[in-house]
C-alpha cells in the first residue's frame, strides 16, 4: 500500500494482510473504491478538485470543469469532465462521477496546461482552448451556455485572441469563431 498527499491509496494483493484491512475499511465506509486496487479517503474527494492523473491517467479536465475553474460559466458541473484519447478503454469509478470526452490524440494536446489546485498538479485545458470547446460543443451544451462563456471570456483583460484564433483553426471552428467575434466585438 502506498499513500500520497491526496489520500489516494493503492493496494496490491501480494500483501494479503494489508489488502484485507483496506477491503474491510472500504466495506465499513472508511474508504471509497475508485477502481480495483485504488481507494480514497472520503475527505480526499470532498474538495473542489480531485487528482485526475491518479484516477484517469493521461486525462485532461475540460468542458464544464474547466469553464467553472476559469469562472466562464455559472453552470455547476455535476461531474468531472475529462478528455481522453478516442480509442482508449476506461474503467471509471462510481464516485466521483467522471464524464469522459473522447477526442483524437492530436486534439488532446491543443491548449493542454498543468495547473496547481489544492497542492495537486492537474492537467486542464487552458482558457482559450476552453472557449474553443464551448464553440465546438455548442449544439450539445446549448447556445446560451456558449454565449455566456464567450461573453465572460471577452471581459477578461488578459485574453489572448491570437491564441484563441490559432486553436480555432486547429479545431476547425475558425469561421464560426470569426462570425461570433464580429457580432461581439
Image (tube, grey):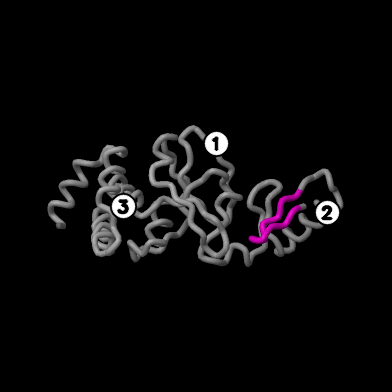
Label annotation for residue 131:
3
What residue is shown at x 55% (from left), y 36% (from top)?
Answer: 89
What's the residue at 39%, 38% (across, down)?
Answer: 107
Quadrant location, the C terminus: bottom left
Q: Which residues are magenta?
A: 2-11
Magenta segment: does it hold 7?
Answer: yes
- Does 174 appear in magenta? no
In front of the other: label 3 or label 2?
3
Decide: marks 1, 3 in contact (CB < 8 A)?
no
Q: Nearer the viewer, mark 1 or mark 3?
A: 3
Gap in angstroms between the C-alphas marked 2 and 1: 29 Å
The disc at residue 41 is none
Regarding mark 2 in the picture, which secondary structure is present there?
helix
Q: Which residue is mark 2?
A: 18
- Specify the label residue 89 is tagged with: 1
Locate residue 100, reporting x and y percent. Answer: 47, 45
State how far apart marks 1 and 3 are (Cα).
27 Å
Q: Residues within 10 Å of mark 1 (few under 14, many from 20)?
A: few
Q: Taking 129 as reference, is 154 left or right?
A: left
Earlier sequence position, callout 3 versus callout 2: 2
Lower sequence index among marks 1 and 3: 1
Locate residue 44: give its quadrant: bottom right
Q: 42 or 8, which is in the foreground? A: 8
Q: Are marks 2 and 1 in contact (CB under 8 Å)?
A: no
**How many neighbours does mark 2 have within 10 angstroms: few (below 14), some (14-19), or many (20 or more)?**
some
The earlier-in-sequence mark between 2 and 1 is 2
Amino acid at each position: 500500500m502506498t499513500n500520497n498527499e491526496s489520500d489516494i491509496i493503492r493496494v496490491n494483493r501480494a500483501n494479503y494482510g494489508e489488502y484485507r484491512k483496506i477491503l474491510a475499511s472500504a466495506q465499513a465506509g472508511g474508504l471509497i473504491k475508485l477502481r480495483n486496487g485504488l481507494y480514497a479517503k472520503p475527505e480526499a474527494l470532498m474538495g473542489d478538485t480531485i487528482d485526475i492523473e491518479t484516477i484517469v491517467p493521461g486525462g485532461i479536465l475540460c468542458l464544464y470543469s474547466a469553464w467553472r475553474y476559469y469562472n466562464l460559466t455559472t453552470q455547476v458541473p455535476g461531474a468531472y469532465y475529462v478528455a481522453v484519447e478516442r480509442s482508449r478503454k476506461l474503467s471509471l469509478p462510481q464516485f466521483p462521477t467522471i464524464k469522459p470526452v473522447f477526442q483524437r490524440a492530436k486534439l488532446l494536446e491543443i491548449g493542454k496546461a498543468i495547473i496547481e489546485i489544492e497542492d495537486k498538479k492537474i492537467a486542464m485545458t487552458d482558457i482559450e482552448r476552453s472557449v474553443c470547446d464551448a464553440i465546438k460543443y455548442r449544439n450539445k451544451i446549448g447556445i446560451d451556455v456558449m454565449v455566456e462563456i464567450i461573453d465572460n471570456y471577452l471581459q477578461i483583460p488578459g485574453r489572448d485572441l491570437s491564441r484563441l484564433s490559432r486553436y480555432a483553426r486547429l479545431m476547425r471552428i475558425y469561421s464560426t469563431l470569426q462570425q461570433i467575434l464580429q457580432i461581439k466585438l
